[in-house]
Amino acid sequence: MASDHDRRVVITGAGVLSAIADSAAGLHAALCQGKSGLKPIELFSTEGLGCHQAGEIRPFEPRDYLGERNLRPIDRTSRLLLVAAGQALAAAGWTPEALAAGENEVGLVLGTTFCSVRTIAEFDRRGLQLGPSYASPFDFANSVINAAAGQAAIWFGLRGLNTTISAGESSGLAAIGYATGQIRGGRAAAVLAGGVEELCFESFVGHYRAGRLCGSHGESEEVPVPFHPRRNGFALAEGAALLMLEDAEAAAARGVPVLAEVRGHGGAFAPRRTREDGAGAVARAILVALEDAGLGPGDVDCLSVSASGSVESDLWEAVGIATALGPRAADLPVAAIKAQLGEALGASGGLQAVALLGTLRDGMLPGVAGLAEPAADIPLRGAGAENRRVRARWALATSLSADGHASAVILGAPGAASGVGG
Amino acid sequence: MKTRIAVTGIGLVTPIGAGRQEVWEGLLAGRSGFAPVESFDTKAFSVHLGAEVRGFDPAPWVRRHDPASMGRASLLAIAAARQALEDAGLDSESVEPERAGVAMGTTSGEPREVERFDDRFLAGELDQVGPEFLSLYPCHMIAAHVARELGFAGVNTMIPTACAAGNYAIAHAVDVLRAGRADLMLAGGADAFSRITYTGFARLGAIAPERCQPFDRNRKGMIPGEGAAVLVLEPLERARARGARVYAELAGYGLSCDAHHMTAAHPEGDGAARAMERALADSGAAPGDVSYISAHGTGTPTNDRLETLAVKRVFGAAAGRTPMSSIKSMIGHTMGAASAIEAAVCALAVAEDRIPPTMNLEEPEDDLDYVPNTARGHRVDLAMNNAYAFGGNNASVILRKCEA
């Protein structure tokens, strides 16, 4: 693979809004404390469906975070995003004055599956019920899938590149990879990257009827546990999570502290939807990321996986990781944060990455809540309920979407690269 | 030294026909793709024209999977992708699957699937919603379906940046190839004709009642459309080694965001100008080197005025002598497919030294050379493809003549 490594990409800030925490530091702490975001859904009625729990963000009072500016044209997806983006920008010292200053351009690369399918569907239904002339122009502006990224650009004055990436559960890590490429290529010096997803009726019904939710199958609704022998689906969730990525030299020139670095990224696709194919895509994404990072399997200190309680994807991802990392995978410490957060789709990769910042800072990797022992066919035997103290230099985050998109991102602690030759 | 990227295959499905040759000849002849909308009833609207793809049969293209298992935008995309591969002298077996990727853009993904959901919702028949909603609707299924159909296991990226999405996808494919992450990328855009899109643009008063007249002082709006375009992109060295025909070199791109308004362009064309300047710098070119500009040119009053302003701002004295046309005057606004179709047109303009016209242009609003109403023979060494979108997203892509 050709090198595009003229520039290093560092993380100078992070922002999170989730069902268990509303800050980057709070996310890692809440995960390590074993908090769960799953609760009975209040955003919409689940009457007639066999599933009633989700990782809903509640209470959520946007004004607590966003002040008195006009929120009327901003839908829930965009509001979630604005909260996380505001935190990440502030943490990295991007004040409104700095963002407005002449040559400064901050970009945004946003992962999302639906943006707001609720906004889209409500716009359509209103037009059908009352006639096209009663459809809302505000809603129409928000009906494009890049609407949240556009709203955030307007809100904060982000005039750099603005790209939305959709890859289901892999959207967030794919967005971090895309943004890393843009910075390495010299096309941007500072880019927010991560993802957002809102919990809504349309998505919930879709996932329920597709048989993907824990509770889709008629049996009593349990708490979903990734890698569990009796797992039968996940809990849907919502959230927003972003990293502030910057060119290392530009960040140094601004004098902002470095939280971690994005060392490598990789992506692949599973066109055939078999165990071999899914695992193969995960393995290739990891191997590309390792090569990109100049690291070997033995360098990986800990893992954050996208396993959620899904019957197939959990297994395929685990097998793919074992394929790529070899014997190292067997006892590697593993975090599977969807055990507590649920499946936040486009936001999930960002949540995985932000949670790893805490691990790289203090060496504590959250355990997999509720997991006594992984299913016999899961090769990641290091997955368990207890928090683990890890040697935290290099952390690997992986994801596999239900539709076959695999992503891998390698994060490094500040100074971790000193032993890698550059 | 950057890896040079070649365009070696073109696939097109548009309201004026399908296939590179048919579409190109139609555009040079000034064919119109506008007709009363057939895919839904427009009697509640005050406008009725659309640019639909009529009589599209997916069967010749969708071979490995059941066409009923995917949405219309995916079907259009697969048709364009298979055409593009064949046009490049390739088939899915002649490509190493792990080194072949897909990058696609869209505005709405598969909007008809959410419309079907809404119809059931309002009819009190939500129990009729089955697993197909989730396997059909998410926009990332367009790129996923293309890859499944062709067995491509490399990078798979869906970029839903609305009406500039095709250019974003092509730009991303360039980066993937330059970084050595793939040997071949299919890149383009697809959108299906949609009640939601039509309702929205009608509500904004942006749909023209009779025809689309970009850059005419009496223009009344755009005509919503649908379609798909896919380009085969590969490193120039590899393309030459296998003796492929090279339409053009994908020389560079530039992205920016207005950060101004969700649906209206920046009043001084700021973001559009920055995207053009960046694309020029990325291509090592100056404004005077550009021989053709493929305009975003929707036919709405504000877009066309601000686009002219932005071009003048970037090109200065060269603006008046650089031909600029909008094929949306013929095929309408095909949304996420639009800039991919226009990139294909730029590749053909570069390869054949011909420029398609801006049709229906009777009274030009400004003094640029909008190539009114008749195609033109003109040496095209460098073509710039401009695209702008809701959310303030701007993307310019530059294609360069690639001498043998």
Image (spheres, helix red, strand yellow):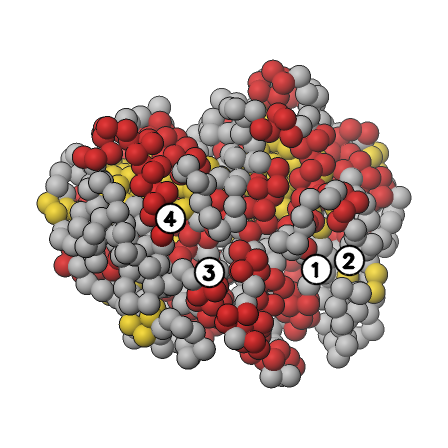
Q: Residue, x 57% and y 60% (percent of image)?
A: A139
Residues under labels 4 and 3: Cα distance?
A: 13 Å
Q: Residue, x 30% and y 56% (percent of image)?
A: B219
Residue B114 placement: quadrant: bottom right
Tell which of A117 and A334 is nearer to you.
A117
The x, y position of residue A203, in whole percent, is 65, 65
Q: Is residue A356 left or right of residue B363?
A: right
Q: Please tell me whether mark 2 or mark 3 is closer to you in this view.
A: 3
- Tell me, yes or no, whether the two marked residues, 4 and 1, touch with CB atoms within 8 Å: no
The x, y position of residue A163, in whole percent, is 51, 43
Q: Amino acid at mark 3?
A: Leu
Q: Give SS at disc 3.
A: loop
Residue B204 circle label: 3
Q: Give SS at disc 4.
A: helix
**How many residues crowd mark 2 within 10 Å: few (<14), some (14–19), many (20+)?**
many
Tags 1 and 3 on a common chain: no
Residues under labels 1 and 3: Cα distance?
A: 28 Å
Tags 2 and 1 on a common chain: yes
- Tell me, yes or no, whether the two marked residues, 1 and 3, touch with CB atoms within 8 Å: no
- Tell me, yes or no, whether the two marked residues, 2 and 1, touch with CB atoms within 8 Å: yes
**How many residues crowd mark 3 within 10 Å: few (<14), some (14–19), many (20+)?**
some
- Chain to which mark 3 belongs: B
Give the residue number, with chain letter if any, for mark 4: B303
**Residue extending furthest toward the left:** B377
Residues under labels 2 and 1: Cα distance?
A: 7 Å
Give the residue number, with chain letter if any, for mark 1: A199
Tags 2 and 4 on a common chain: no
Q: Residue, x 61% and y 41% (percent of image)?
A: A155
**Residue extending furthest toward the right:** A33
Residues under labels 4 and 1: Cα distance?
A: 35 Å
